[in-house]
Image (tube, rainbow, N blue to C red):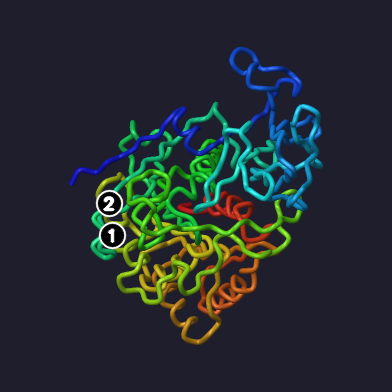
Amino acid sequence: MNIPIRLLSGAAVIAFVCTTAVFSQPSPGQAAAGRGAAQGPRVVSPEILPDKKVTFRLLAPKAGEVLLNGNWDNGRNIKMTKDDAGIWSVTVDPLGEQLWGYSYSVDGLKVLDPGNGEYQRDGNRYDNLLMISGPASELWDFRPEIPHGTVQAIWYPSEILKQKGRRMYVYTPPGYETSKANYPVLYLLHGGGGDEDAWTTMGRANVILDNLIAQGKAKPMLVVMPNGNAAQIVSQGYAYGPTPPRQSVTAPAPPPVQAAQGLGAAGRGPAAPGAPPTPGRGMPQVYERSYPQSLVKEIIPFIEKNFRVIANKDNRAIAGLSMGGGHTTMATNNNPGVFGWIAVWSAGGQDTEEYVNTLKKVNAGGVKHYWIGAGTTDFALNGSKTLYSAAQKAGLNATFHSAPGAHYWFIWRQFLGEFGSIIFK
């Protein structure tokens, strides 16, 4: 069959993953030239100050109240003040070196910052992006001077899920197109509320792999990022399906976060993105005719047929966060010997005799490393520790990792960097 492919490279990749924010700004009081001069005062937002304080502005002369909502510590419902020109503004305390999200509330209505063209989508929720660069953000900060891989949007059929076409993203490392080498593969799974877009936009997986490979910390590899929603063939925003979408995947708002080295979160809050797998939130109740079965029986053979990969267990890894962590355990528990490297982030297991015996079969399949991680204030922390206990009893070469933060991308980007640095070695 003909496989439609969208090839993203060079500037297209930069635009696709929303890699940059506003770094250098003209004076906030500077009037716009040309057509802009007739449209009112020019508004610069956000403005990153030398001490890493950030000023946010919005032109809304008729608004009665404007609030700033950011996903940093104490970043919710920050009151902004209006000047005589109708510009609302506020300056927040220095932000940590991180990729932050924010939006405005204008008289109770959520509004994106028109001064900032960088944004991210998490399910149905959109936020502006703000990158504070520095040593702590080097892992996921875009570096134009290094070689870059390519991200392709691939369509494949699924008999198991009864769909003629489903979409996934495939990252190939720098030099793949010009070499004849075969490469190992990491299958990277998103959480609840996400889709195949999540790991390149929210997770910045291709940026992280480019940086790791350039630094010699990771082996060149393919990264396959499928859509884990069994009823959804493609992510939203492309008009590839009916309007409205047949399945509308909504990600809850992120929790307020705790400034633990600028990377943390204060707990779950009223809702959190990528919540643990529960009935009705994307996790299948049985393996047969499920997305994890399709991953093993359809996606892996498709990749090994259409890409130059090393098709054996030792060169095949899988990692998933939250719901994707549940998908990871379901895929690996039902298929011992398929994956040599396994990572489960912010998801749990059972410390029962039956579950331990299942993990013993996984271990007998030749797992090199079973990598478990959760945030220090992650509501999935206890479940992750339970899985670690069961993995130890099963004799797996298991390690447990934690990072300051809650159930959000701050920790999962870090985990990808750590896991990506050890696999296939």
Q: Farthest front residue?
A: 62
Check whether the beta carbons of the residues at disc 2 and disc 1 lie within 8 A of each other: yes
Residue 404 visible at all? no
Closest to the camera, between mark 2 and mark 1, is 2
Q: Position of residue 39 (x, y in %)?
A: 63, 21
Q: How many marks?
A: 2
Q: Nearer the viewer, residue 137 or 122?
A: 122
| 304 relative to 152, above or below | below
Q: Residue at x 49, y 49 (%)?
A: 199
Q: Secondary structure at mark 2?
A: strand
Residue 353 visible at all? yes
Q: Amino acid at mark 1?
A: Glu
Q: Report whether 323 appears left or right of 158.
A: right
| Circle 1 residues within 10 Å: few <14, some 14–19, many ≥20 | some
Q: Which residue is mark 2?
A: 156
Q: Which mark is residue 260?
A: none
| Circle 2 residues within 10 Å: few <14, some 14–19, many ≥20 | some
Q: Position of residue 2 (x, y in %)?
A: 20, 43
Q: Amino acid at mark 2?
A: Tyr
Q: Which mark is residue 298?
A: 1
Q: Position of residue 402 (x, y in %)?
A: 66, 61
* Quarter of image, res 24: top right
Q: Residue at x 49, y 42 (%)?
A: 206
Q: Nearer the viewer, residue 80 or 194?
A: 80
Q: Residue at x 39, y 59 (%)?
A: 247
Q: Residue at x 50, y 58 (%)?
A: 250
| 424 relative to 344, above or below | above
Q: Report whether 405 appears left or right of 251.
A: right
* Spatial CA span between label 2 and label 1: 9 Å
